[in-house]
């Protein structure tokens, strides 16, 4: 559907010997180390998602100012203006959410839950905002002439990789049950 600039393929490792001096951490810690890498990755995905949402919003605003129906720019029809307002509010809220998590990381504080919250909120926002951007452009949004259909396709993967959003809810709910996790 998207990510066309990046090759996506499965990798298989069979009978690979790794020299002992290349060991990361201590034996038995591997999964924990691998999972901790996901926290930072989730922040990155949240930032990407906000970028996609912002690009879709900017394009939709520009188009809605230009496109005229019934004698006025479509942005002046309340149905479209309020849709854009909701898109802007969601994008700003998502940006604030991942910045909270990023500041905790920068300050050396635990941020596992905040990273999952940021990934969940930002990527669901990107999906909603890009879908609405297609709506703002009407039929023009659905065809290849404008980038909003691509933004919508690119937003979808952010809800799936680096842990699906169902898994983010699992991380968050487990932490709520036991804050030491
Ligand atoms: C384009 C692309 C790029 C990718 N890049 C990478 C990469 O660079 N590195 C990498 O390691 N992986 C990468 N992945 C893999 C990606 O992280 C996984 O696809 C993703 O984590 C989901 O796993 P899955 O596909 O096995 O889905 P499944 O685990 O089979 O999930 C299927 C459905 O069940 C839900 N589900 C599964 N378990 C639970 C549960 N316990 N509770 C509730 N719901 C659940 C999921 O949310 C999903 O809706 C990439 C995938 C794609 C498509």
Image (tube, rainbow, N blue to C red):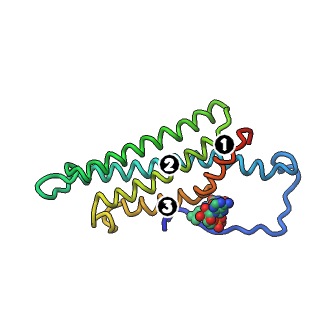
- Could you give the CA–CA distance between mark 1 and mark 3, rounded to whole angstroms? 27 Å
Pointer 2: what residue?
Answer: 122
Name the residue at 61% across, 52% down: 169
The quadrant in which residue 91 appears is: top left
Depth order, front residue of 17/28: 28
The quadrant in which residue 136 appears is: bottom left
- The x and y percentages for residue 120 are 55, 50
Q: Are marks 3 and 2 in contact (CB under 8 Å)?
A: no
Horizontal side of residue 13 vs 151, given as left or right:
right
The answer as to whether callout 2 falls within 8 Å of ligand 1 is no
Query: How many residues crowd mark 1 within 10 Å: few (<14), some (14–19), many (20+)?
Result: few
Pointer 1: what residue?
Answer: 176
Pointer 3: what residue?
Answer: 156
The quadrant in which residue 88 appears is: top left
Horizontal side of residue 150 vs 77, given as left or right:
right
- Which part of the image, by quadrant, shows the C terminus? top right
Query: How many residues crowd mark 2 within 10 Å: few (<14), some (14–19), many (20+)?
Result: many
- Could you give the CA–CA distance between mark 3 and mark 2, rounded to whole angstroms? 12 Å
Name the residue at 58% across, 33% down: 103
Q: Is residue 7 visible?
A: no
Depth order, front residue of 81/103: 81
Report the image quarter containing ligand 1.
bottom right
- Choose the circle earlier in sequence order: 1 or 3: 3
- Choose the circle earlier in sequence order: 3 or 2: 2
In the structure shown, which secondary structural element does the residue marked by tag 3 occupy?
Answer: helix
Horizontal side of residue 46 vs 109, given as left or right:
left
In the structure shown, which secondary structural element does the residue marked by tag 2 occupy?
Answer: helix
- Could you give the CA–CA distance between mark 1 and mark 2, rounded to whole angstroms? 20 Å
Query: How many residues crowd mark 3 within 10 Å: few (<14), some (14–19), many (20+)?
Result: some
Q: Which mark is residue 82?
A: none
């Amino acid at each position: 559907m998207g990510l066309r600039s990046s090759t996506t393929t499965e990798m298989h490792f069979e009978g690979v010997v790794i020299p002992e001096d290349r060991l990361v951490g201590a034996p038995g810690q591997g999964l924990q180390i691998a999972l901790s890498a996901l926290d930072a990755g989730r922040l990155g995905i949240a930032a990407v998602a906000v970028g996609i949402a912002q690009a879709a919003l900017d394009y939709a605003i520009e188009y809605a100012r230009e496109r005229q129906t019934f004698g006025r720019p479509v942005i002046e029809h309340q149905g479209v203006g309020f849709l854009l307002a909701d898109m802007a509010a969601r994008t700003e809220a998502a940006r604030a959410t991942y910045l909270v998590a990023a500041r905790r990381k920068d300050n050396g504080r635990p941020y596992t839950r905040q990273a999952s919250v940021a990934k969940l909120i930002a990527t669901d926002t990107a999906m909603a905002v890009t879908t609405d951007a297609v709506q703002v452009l009407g039929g023009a949004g659905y065809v290849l002439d404008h980038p909003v259909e691509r933004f919508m396709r690119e937003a979808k993967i952010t809800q799936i990789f680096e842990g699906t959003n169902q898994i983010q809810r699992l991380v968050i709910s487990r932490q709520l049950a036991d804050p030491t996790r």
